[in-house]
Image: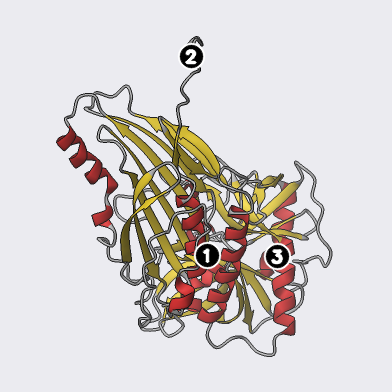
Amino acid sequence: MKRIFAAFLLFCLAAGAATAPPPDQAAPPARAAAPTVPAPAPPPHLPPSAPPGATPSAPAPGETDTQDALPPPSSAAQDLYASARGDLLQIRMLLKNGRTQSTVGSGFLVGTGNLVVTNYHVVSQMALDPDVYTAEFVDTDGSSGPVELMAVDVLHDLAVLRVKREGSGFFRVPERPLRLTQGQRLYSLGNPLDLGFAISEGAYNGVVTRSFYDQLMFGGPINSGMSGGPSVTGNGTVAGVNVSKRRDGESVSFLVPVKYVQELLHKVDSQPAPPKDFNPLIAAQLLEHQRAMVDRLLEEPLAIKSMGPYLVPVRESGQLRCWGRSNVKAETAYTLDAMSCAMESAIYVSASQQTGHVSMTHQYIRSDNLARLPFAALASRLFGAGQQGSVIDTRMTKPVCTERFVHTRTLPLRAVTCVRAYRKFEGLYNFTLLAASTNAAESSLQSRLDVSGVSYENGMRVTRAFLGSFGRSVRRTPPPGSKP
């Protein structure tokens, strides 16, 4: 199953390693009830990777970018836009070599100062690779100027810039939490598809319940290029910042709540100077996220579900959803039932990298038609351990994998654990655990766990909990004389 978070389109026309822990910290002792997890040595520290790929400002040849058309604005929207247009900006990422436009997004001046709020993903190229990318703003009159990156909040997809001009005071970021009512009219502003500044009308539809961090649901179109623009009430009070939309729906869009804007602006006010290097700051924020993510994932024991004779661990919560499928009606030589659980959100790092995500998949395979040897070949092919690391990823080190045969209380398993380190962000790793039952020749349980953007200790913590939860149903013999 495709990860559900892929249904979210990040509008960055903006949308564009880790030191190994000491050996004595690499594999903490497992609990008595859990088997030993294969513990590969953490990958070595390597030089920074090449600059991440950029999201182009238009679809690549052969691709389509379906967008909701912006309806003609009402008289109220026209009046609001006339008052706000002087404080709306387009933010352009440029290659330093040749000053060629790479990506574009939107932003807005806050109050009467010279600070601009936008999305992190709009300026991610400049934050990650300042030697390669720079940025400029363009206002509604066509005037342009340089921008200085002051702060980023990767977890909530926000950034603050400084420019050499001041706002009119139209866009007000409230000091106290803003209370919105279901159905309240909101107005989203930005520069859609690099066509020109525009305003979109819609309604506030509550807080998204299946996001790790709060997001507001906006019932109106937000198109690519409007990322980082403001969504405001009728009097210009900022309610949120445009961030994304659902590609599988119509006018289902999302905003970063203004409370996170307040927090980031306070940090800018208190800092003596902007960071010279944002990569360590981004790494620290991602490490903060993974601690909260893993604690929430493991705050209760994993739920156990049955797949044929096997017991498998799952997690279904406000952040993870589970789905099932089967090929039972297909004309195949084997039957496969699958269950997948995945987080519905991830942290955007760059146009080519998202992290802070957990997914788990189980497949129960059996066949009455295949002999043992062909079935064993089928199970080995579906297991796919040899495919780990076959795709080159310059953002990560090569995977370091360890294979072992382990035993839970009731089920023997073949387990392969692979770990990759982030080249840019010290202390962060991706873990993949593959597990397959070894107790039957005519059936196979195959499972996969992927945990991205975690510390080495937390990656081992999650894989232990996952692997230690497998089992096999025990059939009890009925007492003599009882009915079957």
104 vs 337, left or right, is right
Tell me how far mark 2 sits from mark 3, CA to CA.
67 Å
Mark 2 or mark 3, earlier in chain:
3
Mark 1 lies on a secondary structure that is: helix
Q: Amino acid at mark 3?
A: Tyr
The answer to whether residue 457 is visible is yes
Judging by the rendered image, the residue that carries numbered circle 2 is 480
Question: Viewer-nearest of labels 1 and 3?
Answer: 1
Measured along the vertical axis of the image, is residue 1 above or below residue 476?
A: below
Measured along the vertical axis of the image, is residue 328 above or below residue 183?
A: above
Mark 1 or mark 2, earlier in chain:
1
Question: Viewer-nearest of labels 1 and 2?
Answer: 2
Mark 3 lies on a secondary structure that is: helix
Q: Quadrant of the N terminus?
A: top left
Judging by the rendered image, the residue that carries numbered circle 1 is 458
Q: Which residue shows up at 53% across the image and 81% down it?
A: 280
